[in-house]
Each structure stands twice: as structure tokens, then as C-alpha cells.
Amino acid sequence: MALPAYDVTAAVIERDNKVFCARRAAHKDLAGFWEFPGGKIEPSESFVGCLQRELKEELGIEAKVEKYLMTTTHQYPDKLIRLYVYRVAWLTGELTCSDHDETCWLPVARLRELKWAPADLPILDYLASDSRTTK
Ligand SMILES: Nc1nc2c([nH]c(=O)n2[C@H]2C[C@H](O)[C@@H](COP(=O)(O)OP(=O)(O)OP(=O)(O)O)O2)c(=O)[nH]1
């Protein structure tokens, strides 16, 4: 039988030459893995609308989705994830984390020190080779 497939958005938020990273909490699937904030697209929702909603819900921030970066697909044992990655500017709001159990800001060159969700590894490669991202 075909695995369930999910379209998921993810945000690369940069500030002071560092990228925002968040760790999935114990009650979530892939608990303990680090990710870029975002979430599953709801029916009839746009990618940008999904990302803005998730960032408001998870982090309490208003964000401007600046640029589409890449899409990566990963098959986990129980699901297929298509991850749509955008560069996002944090506009307003105090960043408070309601959904993750740990967060940090890291320069791109240090991102691999964290244990990332396997679907995210191509994103790290992309950021490392992206001249717009500060290393
Ligand atoms: N948001 C996000 N999810 C990721 C990343 N990498 C990765 O494998 N995933 C996976 C984990 C989950 O299986 C799925 C996203 O689901 P989620 O649980 O965060 O999304 P959600 O809040 O909309 O979903 P739900 O708990 O309401 O079902 O994608 C990533 O960088 N960001």
C-alpha cells in the first residue's frame, strides 16, 4: 500500500548571520530531531499562507516570505514528506516557542552540529552552497 504523502513548508529565518533552528518536541513524530519551522499544508491553503500561519502559531511572529529556495522529498518508513523551503524575514512579534522543546541560532557552517530530520539534509547542502547565505 502507498505510504501517506504530506506537503510541508519550512522556513529559513536568518538574523545576525545566524539561522533559526528548532527541535521537535517529545510528543511529535521525529521527536528530538532538529528542523526548520513550518508544517503541513492544509486543504486549499497556499504554500506562503501555510508558512505564515505556522510561524504565527509556532513562534508568534509575523513573517514575510521572501523567496522560494528549494523542494526536497524524503521517504521515512511510514510517510513521504515533500518539503518546500522558503527564505523568510521576521517582521514583527516577540519570538516565543510554543511547539518545540529547544531552539537555537547557528551560522550555516555550524548547522551540521545538530541532529537534523533526515529530510532536511539537502537543505543544509543548499544553504552551504548558497552565496546569499552568510557562512
Ligand atoms: N515543519 C517541518 N517539518 C519537517 C521538517 N523536516 C521533516 O522531516 N519534517 C516532517 C516532520 C513531520 O513528519 C512533518 C511536518 O509535520 P508537523 O507535525 O510539523 O506539521 P503540523 O504541525 O502541520 O502537523 P500536525 O502536528 O498538526 O499533524 O514533516 C522541517 O524542517 N520542518
Image (cartoon, rainbow, N blue to C red):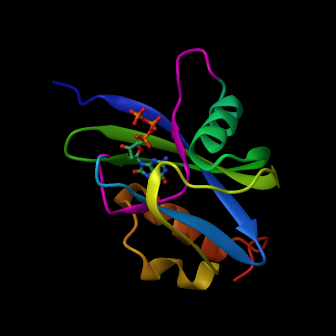
What is the quadrant of residue 36 in the picture? Answer: bottom right
Image x and y of residue 110, in percent: 54, 84
- Residue at horizontal 69%, vertical 30%? 49
Q: Which residues are magenta?
A: 28-45
Instruction: Place residue 5 in its image quadrant.
Output: top left
The C terminus lies in quadrant: bottom right
Q: Position of residue 17 (x, y in %)?
A: 75, 78
Quadrant in which the N terminus appears? top left
Q: Nearer the viewer, residue 65 or 20?
A: 20
13 vs 3, left or right, is right
Q: Determine the main secondary structure of the stretch shown in magenta.
A: loop
| Residue that lies at the very extreme toward the left in this rendered image | 1
Tell me if residue 119 is in the magenta stretch: no
Residue 86 percent coordinates (x, y): 68, 49
Report the side of 56 relative to 93 (left or right).
Answer: left
The residue under the point 62% across, 32% down is 50
Q: Within the displayed image, which quadrant is ligand 1 positioned in?
A: top left
